Image: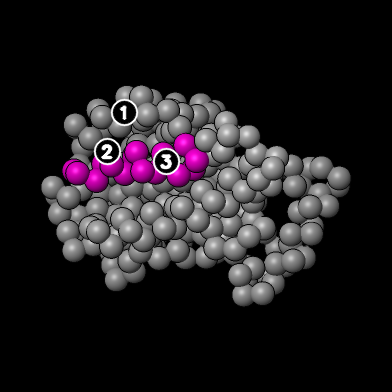
Amino acid sequence: MNLYPEFEGKIVVITGVSSGIGFEQAKAFLDAGAKVFGADIQNGGQVYELNDHGNFNFTKCDVSDPQEIEAWLNPIIENNQIDILINTAGILDGYAPTLETTEDQWDKIFDTNLKSIFRITNLILPQMLENGHGTIVNMASIAGMVAGGGGAAYTAAKFGIIGYTKQLDYDYAAKGIRANCIAPGAIETPMNAKDFEEDDGKMAKWVADQTPAKRWAQPEEVAALTMFLASPRADYIHGTAVPIDGGWLEK
C-alpha cells in the first residue's frame, strides 16, 4: 500500500544514498512512485539494492567538491523539474574537541556537512523558484541543538544547518519554497557501527541507556519522518528542526 501517492512522478534529489538514512529515504520515495536522483561518495553498500529500480539514478559524487556537485546536478536540472531536495550526506568528527581539531579536519566537516547544502541548494533553488514550488529537507542532528552529540566541528556544522534552514525558509517561503530539517539522535547506521562493534558494544549500550526510549532508532524511522515533512500534509511546517531522538532532548 502506497501511503504517499502524492509523490507519484515527483523528481527527488537525495545525497548520501549508499547506506543508512539516505538509503532508506531513497527507497521510501521510490516505493511511493517518485523518480530519485541519488549521490554518494561510496559507489557500493546498500545502493546496489536500488540500482535495479527503473526510477533510480545514481552518481558517485563527493559533495565536498563543488566541481563534482556541478557535474552531477547540472544535467539533472537541465532535463528535469526538481520537486524535492533531501540533503542527507554527512560525516562524523570522532567527538574531537577544538584543541584536537585541525583546520583541515574543520574544513572537511564543514565542506561536507554544511557547505554542500549551501552549494546544492543554490544550484537547485533557482529552478524551484521559477516553478513556484519546492521542498527542501536538510539533515541536522540533536548535535545542532545541544552539546555532546559530536565534536567541535560536527556540532558547529549541525548548528549551522539549522540556522541556514531557518533563514532559507524565511527568505523564500512566500515564493513557494518550504525548508525544514531533521535532528536525529541515536540512529543505528553504518556510520555508527563502531559504537556497536568496539568493546562489546559498550558505547551503544550506554547511549541506549541514556535515551529515555531505551533504544536506538532505525534509519527507516527517519525516512518515514522525511516523507511526512516533504509531503503536502506538512505544508504549514516551515523552517523548523524536528527531533527524532527517543526523548534525548527532553532530559
- Residue 118, by quadrant, is top left
**What SS does tag 1 mark?**
helix
In the picture of the structure, the residue carrying the numbered disc 1 is 70
In the rendered structure, which amino acid carries the disc numbered 3? Lys
Is 47 above or below relative to 133? above
Which comes before the other along the chain, label 2 or label 3? 3
Range of residues picked out in magenta: 110-127
Q: Magenta region, mostly helix, strand or loop?
A: helix
Q: Is residue 59 magenta?
A: no
Q: Nearer the viewer, mark 2 or mark 3?
A: 3
Camera-side residue of 172 and 55: 172
The residue at the point 14 percent across, 49 percent down is: 131
Give how far across and how far down residue 146 sits, in percent: 59, 63
Task: Tell me the distance, in whole angstroms, between the alpha carbons under discs 2 and 1.
Answer: 8 Å
In the picture of the structure, the residue carrying the numbered disc 3 is 115
- Residue 237, by quadrant, is bottom left
Quadrant location of the N terminus? bottom left
Q: Nearer the viewer, mark 1 or mark 3?
A: 3
Give how far across and how far down residue 12 sits, in percent: 32, 45
Inspect this view and state whether residue 31 appears. no
Give how far across and how far down residue 78 sits, in percent: 19, 31
Q: Are marks 2 and 1 in contact (CB under 8 Å)?
A: yes
Disc 2 residue crowd, few under 14, some 14–19, many 20+, Cα 10 Å: some
Quadrant location of the C terminus? bottom right
